[in-house]
Image (tube, rainbow, N blue to C red):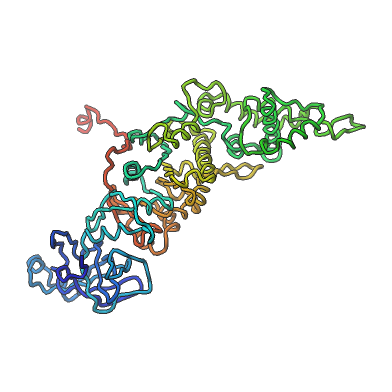
């Protein structure tokens, strides 16, 4: 199809700048929508795409402003506007988006080395033509096949938005927007597209349970499944228990080491240190240092409180006149007193029913399954499902339980990715309400700041390992800027808060920042798509998913006597 046919001529270029051109339209009638050979052309209205003719290269641009000369404004009236021989000569301003070879117009590129010339002809761009351009976004030169999904339409030309899923998810993706903008429906549409168009596995952390309508393998943490605390990392446990730096952290670390040694000996008890020799302990530690210092919580946590007491001994035994550094001494009551708050937190944690059911401390219900085993079976295809939904809706907010368990799940997937388990069959990891889980820190006056950073590490490391992250959040300002900067694609719904807009602006490339002014006025389901593999930002209207999530806000109920109250 020739993009430079005179039948869809609009006007001439009369000014050129590095980012924009200005256009002279010989007649206002040329700006109207029209059909030609069965194709719809959007004309020359604001927001529409246009084609600019060149000698070797053509150019795609988007109209951002239409103006009428001051001398002609006084003549405006309804009859003059609809008159075919009207003498109105509007001018327009258009943003240059990309260039293309006129012999292969579907091959586009972002470049500053080529520009149109004064007097170049401007043409309307058909829906079919812009659709072909969009399909090429993100496609590599040596890539013969690609996976496409139609997830909506362009708001300007009403063209189908048939996008490469590799371009969308290949460098991580973020879906952001305020409540009511359509963010949840977008996530559902993306999951549906992936599940229908690909064979890849999808794991979704559902923070509130609103995605229970999605066809998936579903587990509800704390209700029918648990995350085994043995798979937590030591930093996770410290985040959970918040030991103070100078008096509690060293004791807690020693207690963990001792309990790991007990487990390796297949003994279910504490390790007594009071007035005992150190040589056997030190030799065993030296021979099993790899298992003991493996950074996991692989020990019996129910013995943690009594083991802390066993660690509260003097580090030197013997008599005062003849100290023996090869032995531990008697109990140190002062050191034990410093552990009171830590022991209280451990006791509360182990005796709270929801945390026992969530992390399997003791007496795990028979019908509960480990989420680790569930994930492994899911990845092996045991359940013949493409989507695994992990619901967090019944996890309490106390003890940072949601943050720690989500971080632990992410850490498990991160470890598998580093072992190259997903190279041949990539995984897409969706995190709903990501601001609840990312950028979480606990600050203690003695121990400093402890962070949960598994999601951040996935964003920075795992694209090359085949673990792709898709974050959904209404508060991008609460996502670490380092994580946001790793997102290759953004689907941005309406944003009103200035700090949220600045967070997206900081993460987006400078060439896309000028379109962010649309964000406060986007309608429901409308979004701005921008990213590394998209040479230009696109305004789109997302299609309604086949099975929408249940994300409606409960409504107040009108009283039957409300009319009489008003009177």
Q: Position of residue 473 (x, y in %)?
A: 41, 45
Q: Residue at x 39, y 64 (%)?
A: 511
Q: In the shown orientation, is residue 275 left or right of residue 285?
A: right
Q: Residue at x 46, y 52 (%)?
A: 484
Q: Position of residue 338 (x, y in %)?
A: 71, 32
Where the N terminus falls, by quadrant? bottom left
In the image, residue 132 above or below residue 335: below
Q: Residue at x 36, y 36 (%)?
A: 211
The answer to whether any part of residue 185 appears in the image is no
Q: Image quadrant of residue 115? A: bottom left
Of 474 and 425, nearer the camera is 425
Q: Image quadrant of residue 275? A: top right
Where the C terminus falls, by quadrant? top left
Q: Position of residue 36 (x, y in %)?
A: 13, 63
Q: Residue at x 22, y 55 (%)?
A: 158
Q: Image quadrant of residue 391? A: top left
In the image, residue 485 above or below residue 265: below
In the image, residue 289 above or below residue 507: above
Q: In the shown orientation, is residue 478 left or right of residue 279?
A: left
Of 322 and 117, nearer the camera is 117
């Amino acid at each position: 199809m020739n993009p430079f046919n005179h039948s869809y001529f609009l006007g001439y270029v009369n000014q050129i700048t590095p980012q924009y051109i200005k256009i002279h339209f010989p007649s206002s009638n040329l700006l109207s929508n029209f059909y030609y050979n069965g194709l719809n052309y959007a004309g020359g209205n604001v927001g529409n795409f246009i084609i600019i003719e060149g000698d070797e290269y053509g150019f795609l641009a988007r109209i951002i402003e239409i103006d009428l000369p001051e001398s002609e404004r006084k003549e405006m009236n309804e009859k003059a506007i609809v008159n075919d021989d009207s003498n109105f000569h509007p001018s327009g301003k258009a943003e240059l988006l990309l260039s293309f070879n006129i012999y292969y117009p579907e091959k586009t590129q972002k470049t500053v080395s080529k520009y149109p010339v004064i007097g170049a002809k401007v043409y309307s761009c058909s829906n079919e033509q812009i659709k072909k351009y969009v399909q090429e976004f993100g496609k590599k030169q040596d890539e013969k096949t690609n996976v496409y999904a139609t997830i909506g339409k362009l708001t300007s030309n009403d063209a189908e938005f048939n996008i490469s899923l590799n371009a969308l998810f290949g460098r991580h993706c973020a879906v952001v927007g305020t409540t009511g903008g359509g963010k949840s429906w977008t996530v559902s549409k993306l999951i549906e597209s992936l599940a229908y168009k690909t064979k890849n596995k999808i794991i979704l952390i559902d923070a509130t349970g609103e995605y229970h309508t999605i066809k998936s393998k579903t587990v509800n943490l704390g209700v029918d499944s648990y995350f085994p605390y043995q798979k937590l990392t030591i930093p996770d446990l410290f985040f959970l228990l918040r030991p103070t730096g100078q008096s509690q952290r060293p004791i807690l670390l020693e207690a963990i080491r001792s309990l790991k040694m007990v487990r390796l000996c297949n003994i279910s008890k504490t390790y007594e240190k009071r007035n005992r020799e150190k040589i056997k302990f030190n030799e065993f530690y030296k021979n099993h240092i790899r298992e003991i210092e493996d950074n996991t919580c692989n020990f019996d946590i129910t013995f943690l409180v009594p083991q802390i007491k066993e660690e509260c001994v003097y580090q030197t035994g013997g008599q005062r006149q003849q100290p023996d550094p090869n032995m531990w001494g008697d109990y140190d009551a002062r050191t034990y007193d410093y552990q009171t708050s830590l022991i209280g937190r451990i006791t509360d944690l182990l005796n709270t029913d929801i945390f026992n059911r969530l992390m399997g401390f003791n007496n795990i219900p028979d019908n509960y399954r480990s989420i680790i085993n569930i994930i492994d079976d899911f990845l092996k295809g045991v359940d013949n499902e493409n989507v695994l939904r992990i619901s967090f809706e019944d996890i309490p907010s106390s003890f940072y339980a949601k943050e720690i368990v989500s971080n632990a799940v992410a850490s498990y997937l991160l470890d598998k990715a580093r072992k190259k388990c997903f190279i041949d069959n990539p995984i897409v990891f969706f995190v709903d309400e990501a601001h609840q889980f990312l950028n979480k820190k606990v600050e203690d006056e003695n121990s400093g700041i402890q962070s949960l950073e598994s999601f951040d590490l996935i964003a920075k490391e795992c694209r090359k390992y085949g673990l792709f992250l898709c974050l959904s959040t209404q508060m991008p300002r609460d996502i670490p800027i380092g994580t946001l900067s790793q997102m290759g694609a953004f689907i941005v719904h309406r944003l009103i808060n200035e700090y949220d807009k600045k967070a997206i602006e900081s993460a987006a490339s400078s060439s896309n920042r000028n379109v962010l002014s649309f964000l406060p006025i986007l309608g429901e389901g409308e979004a701005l798509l921008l990213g590394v593999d998209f040479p230009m930002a696109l305004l789109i209207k997302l299609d309604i998913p086949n099975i929408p999530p249940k994300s409606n806000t409960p409504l107040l109920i009108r009283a039957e006597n409300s009319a009489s109250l008003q009177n």
